[in-house]
Image: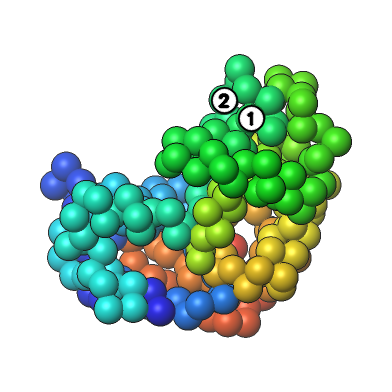
Amino acid sequence: MLEFQNVSLSLQKKEVLKNLNFSITPGEMVAILGASGTGKTSIFRLLLGEQKPTLGSIQLDTIALEKLSASNLQKYRRQIGVVFQDFQLLPQKTVFENVAFALEVCGAEDKIAHKVPELLKLVDLWGKRDQFPSTLSGGEKQRTAIARALVHNPKMLIADEATGNLDPQNSKDIASLFQTLHREKKITILFATHDPILVDALHPRVIRLEGGRILFDKKETTLQEAFRGMA
């Protein structure tokens, strides 16, 4: 169970998150929606321990994230896979090497021969394993990034505008992949998006932010309500 308990965050004397209270149970699919600047990315930075709440606490089971030591924070982060809008692939490495690199940096080279093929087949990129990012489509780059995010068998996948740079068909493909991960790996998926295609395909619980506060938190909502007033 992940819980935000009365969480507020101020940056440069500006309050960007205001008294957030919500919990996410294992295996949930949750979308965080809101116009630009409403605090979606700040929630992810708090979850990754990149920032600490100004007030309140973030609890994972019985652990307060803001109190983790540097070494324990690194161990905790391996339980979370992260996917970004801009892919963040290493241009000088192939698809296979990009995914393998996530294992190399933590001394798990012995897992590469088994784990990387498994993940590239899961995201339907085994045939592209020797290609470099410059030769891939946007959707293929994002699927490479998702494979990399899964190397440590994370309990949670965080995706920040994962389809923000993709066309509608690639957005549908990413949505289908998220559905597969959610169904087969029982992974918790938390994603921020402006993309109605993703929300329409996945039917997630929706947490809608406005002005750094939770406007509503619903397991069932219409697309019109979910995106009303968003720029």
Among numbered discs 2 and 1, the one appearing first in the sequence? 2
Relative image position of residue 48 (x, y in whole percent): 36, 53
Residue situated in front as seen by the camera: 90 or 43: 90
Residue at the spot 22% in from the left edge and 49% down from the top edge: 70
- Badge 2 is on which residue? 90
| Residue 6: quadrant of the picture | bottom left
Name the amino acid type tagged 2.
Leu
Determine if residue 85 is in view: no
Q: Distance between the residues labelled 2 and 1?
A: 9 Å
- In the displayed structure, 88 sits above or below 123; it is above
Tag 2 near tag 1, CB within 8 Å = yes
Q: What residue type is labelled 1?
A: Glu
Closer to the camera in the image, 7 or 80:
80
Report x, y in % for residue 80.
46, 57
Q: Tell me the crowding category of disc 2: few under 14, some 14 to 19, or many 20 or more residues within 10 angstroms, Cα based.
A: some
Helix, strand or loop status at disc 1: helix
Residue at point 39%, 54% (across, down): 77
- In the picture of the structure, the residue carrying the numbered disc 1 is 97
Color scheme of the displayed model? rainbow
Residue at 81% across, 32% down: 128
Q: Which residue is drawn at 60% across and 37% down?
A: 100
Front-most of 169 and 69? 69
